[in-house]
Image (cartoon, rainbow, N blue to C red):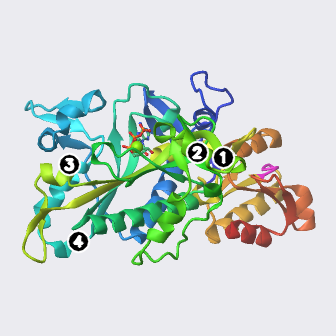
Amino acid sequence: MRLSRYFLPVSKDVPADAAIISHQLMLRTGMVRQNGAGIYTWLPLGFRVLQKIEQIVREEMDRAGAIEMLMPTIQQAELWQESGRYDDYGKEMLRITDRHEREMLFGPTNEELITDVFRSYVKSYKALPLNLYHTQWKFRDEIRPRFGVMRGREFLMKDAYSFDLTEEAARASYNKMFCAYLNTFDRLGLTAIPMQADTGPIGGDLSHEFIILAETGESAVFCDKALLDLPAPGLDLDFEADLSGEVEKRTGYYAATEEMHDEAAFADVPADRQVSARGIEVGHIFFFGTKYSKAMNATVQTADGDTVPVQMGSYGIGVSRLVGGIIEACHDESGIVWPQSIAPFEVGLISMRPKDETVAKVADEAYEALKAAGVDVLYDETDERPGPKFNRMDLIGLPWQIVIGPRGIENGVVELKNRKSGEKSEVTLETAIETVKAG
Ligand code: ATP
Ligand code: MG
């Protein structure tokens, strides 16, 4: 993409109403524009990141055997009346009336809808286990939308729903999602710590929030430092195998949010491993058994011919929240420092003197070579001074910069800069491309 043709409304001003760094940087880099409280337009740069995150989440859901579909944003009230949540949900639910005075709502989540899909088509245990997911906009009329996309009212969530015959099978489905989440966050360049969450009236230990540590996190969290050093299960994980060992490896260490914190248990963690920090919830997985299937009569026939309510779980990831969350974890004083897996472009190519014919020609050739090598490149061939060009490139945080100038051309090299380490080297264009591709 040529910067002169792109839509990148970068701004120098620090927006007064943005309280945290990720929100400031998203506004300054022209990633989003606020439309109303907690409602954002995703401008081109931000939308690229959002899509990259969605794609990684999708790949890891698919790898774990979940099946993608798409449910609507606007739902009929009837299903929610059936489950009993139409009244329980309260003011967070945006209620809508259509021209026929029919009660509708903008979905804050999809348990009812998916349960209805399930009961309409699945009748036998033979179709189980089943895991269906979608990535769709949700609306929750949050009392305090804040921190930009991190606590929005309209936000993008991936939500998966598992269906199993028995509680034991449901636990296996839960473990798959647990491991898939660790791999997903790892690919996003994050260390997300699973923390036991409150399961409410259902009880049991099958609910975890996945938390990334950040000073601006909304909740206080406590955990064993050992958890930060555990590698993700890995992309070669066999999802058909018994994954309880992988899960136990992590749940064996202390990790809790404020609500679940137990001072006495935390005191048992060796002092030099006690981490007390703040965290951002980027995912939440939950086993809720027959809560919806009983209320909505979603049953299956067992091998013995009995009819039983299906066992369900739900698994959410805050896709749009992650954009802000990742910036909270990945920035420095000059701007954003994107992990390469989700960077809007992998390389910023800077032409130092676009008006110099030789420089322009070499830079154009480098642009074509990068594209031909399958590298996502943003090519700054604008006629601005080098200083502001470098600053802008640092601000938007592409992982690599390649600079083309007269001196390098004389020596047959380009300048390659790693945004994260700041390290610069003079290498041939071929070496630069190889380095970028190696990540
Ligand atoms: P929170 O405790 O932060 O309000 P929640 O527990 O209500 O979140 P879930 O119902 O568990 O949220 O939703 C799954 C995921 O969706 C969360 O882990 C979070 O990443 C994301 N999410 C929830 N609410 C919002 C929001 N208002 N804005 C952006 N993302 C959100
Ligand atoms: Mg939650």
Say which residue appears at 53% left-offset and 60% top-offset.
250
| Residue at the disc numbered 1 | 274
What residue type is disc 2 on? Phe
Q: Position of residue 37 (x, y in %)?
A: 42, 26
Q: Dividing the image into four quarters, tell me where ligand 1 lies.
A: top left
Instruction: Find numbered disc 4 in the image and state the secondary structure of the residue it sits on.
Output: loop
352 falls in the magenta region: yes
| Residue at the disc numbered 3 | 112
Say which residue appears at 32% left-offset and 59% top-offset.
133
Of the two numbered discs 2 and 1 on the same chain, state the one appearing first in sequence: 2
Nearest the camera: 272 or 132?
Answer: 272
Instruction: Find numbered disc 3 in the image and state the secondary structure of the residue it sits on.
Output: helix
Nearest the camera: 184 or 356?
Answer: 184
Image quadrant where residue 8 sits: top right
What residue type is disc 1 on? Gln
Disc assigned to residue 266: 2
* Image position of 7 (left or right of 364): left
| Residue at the disc numbered 4 | 128
Q: Give the spatial CA distance, label 4 vs label 1.
A: 42 Å
Of the two numbered discs 2 and 4 on the same chain, state the one appearing first in sequence: 4
